[in-house]
Image (cartoon, grey):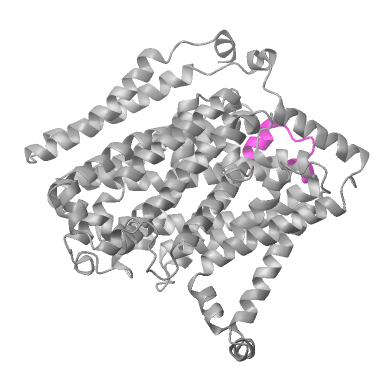
Amino acid sequence: MITVYDYAVIAFYFVFLGGLGWYYRHTAADSDEFFRGSGQMPWWLVGTKSFMGSFSAWTFTGAAALAYDHGFVVLVLYLANVLMFVSNWAWTAARFRQLRVIIGMEAIRLRLGLANEQFFIWISYPVGWLVAGIQLYGLGIICGSMFHLDVRTMIVVCGLSMIFLSALGGAWGVAASNFLQTLILLPITLVVAAYALHVSGGLGNLLHQLPPSSRDFLASDVKGFGAWFVVANVLDKLFNANSLTNTGAVYLAVRDGRAARKVALLSAALFLLGSAVWFLPPWTARALGWDLHALFPALARPSEGAFLAVVVKFFPAGLIGLFATGMISATLATMDNSLSGSAGIVARSIYLPLFRPKASERELVLVGRLATIVLGLVTIAIALVYTTWRDVGVFQLMLSFGAILGIPMAIPIVCCLFLRRAPDWAAWSTVVVNLGAVGLGTFLATLPSFQAMVARAGLSAYLQRFVEHDYVFLVLFNLVTGVGWYVLVAILFRDRLSAPRRAHVKEFFRRFDTPLSPAELREEGSDSIRTVGIGKLVMGFAGVIALLIFIPNPLPGRLAILFCVAAVGLIGFGLYRFGGRVTPAAVKKN
């Protein structure tokens, strides 16, 4: 049951986020500091930022629905995220940091030229807005259902909070909020998992009560799933993870390549922990046969409330509000990162080279802040549109956009790291060929005349299989077509670059393969002073949340609140106590 204490916790959380943005309002001396923290952020801070930026409240709606409906197959999908970060650790994390740029698109310009940079900006922007809108829509679903509030209202409130933090606090504000959000999310989801195991009678009893089909890691008997679905999802994650326009830009914020590899390992470890506990609640709801439609009548797909069911049925006063802040955190962190990255592109890859080559650093920061506001409002509008699509689930929305748009853009940016002598136009033409081929194939598949021709040829079963496994076919078709096209162009038109472009490409790979020198590291320094500031903020948040212990709850509820407070507060104290060992460069800078 929702109480006034829960609403108070949520209200305090939003006020605290606003204060966080205000606290970091001065961390924007130039565009380097505003967009990536001047490459001085500690690896654990960027690691939590990377982790929080890789999922959203969709995990607790769309993915929870997948776990409820089909069981263990959701683990395969989330373990693919672990593999994604492991691939960064093994190959790209350190090399991306060594590119010595402020935003990822500047590396695209160096490797593929100005035309490709602009092409990927303008084709990726709509995709970023659409995905961010999906994430905000998922957050509106989960909060609106829990608190019986209008989904549109929740979308607007959460979206405006995100805009304020990102526009005012810059990279340091976003990273600090992501770190705090991780500290909230992990202990509260551990508590939810503990409640789920308790009410289900333990892990062994829970697994025994699940239908046999739920224990199939491939969901072989489910339409659209199976072994090829898992293969397609893993390939999807690997290509996107090693693309500079996606995960790779995260690593630009840390001190050096070694720190970047630590970021990747921390993100992988956090995802491994999350995968072990996030889906116990929806499995419990399935095993015990709870009526989700009765619990969440406002949801078009009641299974998207499977995670929430444990919370609303068993959580004590105050703890529901803390859980809600964790869910809000999961999405706001992703969108904060997206807004920050998009604003950096507007300022440094559009405004600076195309309109104001002599713009001052102060002007670039102002442009970045204005871009954050505009892009945030666009994201809110898109999320509001999604609320009218009541026959489409959040999970399907995420898969569709990733397969149709994400993969074609990732392919050339990954291939260009291997094929060094391909012409610049190989990159944008790969995207065009992929999107054109997919669009043509989809159009033909819907034509009655084409369907009749397929039937006469005795191939109707294959067309039906394509319809049922559209995600698999889209991913594999895009990969085969895109990689094949890029390789073919690289072979037939190799060494066709002009002398200046050859010099730029050579410089790209020199940076890519060369660790930062001691002189470069001394020049950038490290920012330990702000580590102490983060520790103070975390302890302050834990101190206020500790007041929930005095709410008249049963002993298990108070112990659960105490666990969350202790987890957050102890880490904050550790940062405050041991994080102030400042390097001379950091002292001088600050």
The residue that appears at 33% across and 62% down in the rendered structure is: 70
* For residue 138, side relative to residue 118 (left or right): left
* For residue 379, side relative to residue 141 (left or right): right
- Is 103 a magenta residue? no
Residue nearer the viewer, 554 or 361: 554
On the image, the x and y values in percent for residue 284 come to 21, 55
The residue that appears at 28% across and 67% down in the rendered structure is: 302
Q: Is residue 3 visible?
A: no
Residue nearer the viewer, 553 or 403: 403
Q: Is residue 526 visible?
A: yes
Residue nearer the viewer, 268 or 385: 268
- Is 360 a magenta residue? yes
Q: Is residue 301 above or below residue 183?
A: below
For residue 14, which quarter of the picture? top left
The C terminus: image quadrant: top right
Q: Magenta segment, which residues? A: 352-367
Residue nearer the viewer, 13 or 38: 38
On the image, the x and y values in percent for residue 279 come to 30, 51
Specify the farthest residue to the right: 499
* For residue 156, side relative to residue 196 (left or right): right
On the image, the x and y values in percent for residue 372 come to 56, 46
Magenta highlight: main SS: helix
On the image, the x and y values in percent for residue 500 come to 90, 37
Circle count: 0
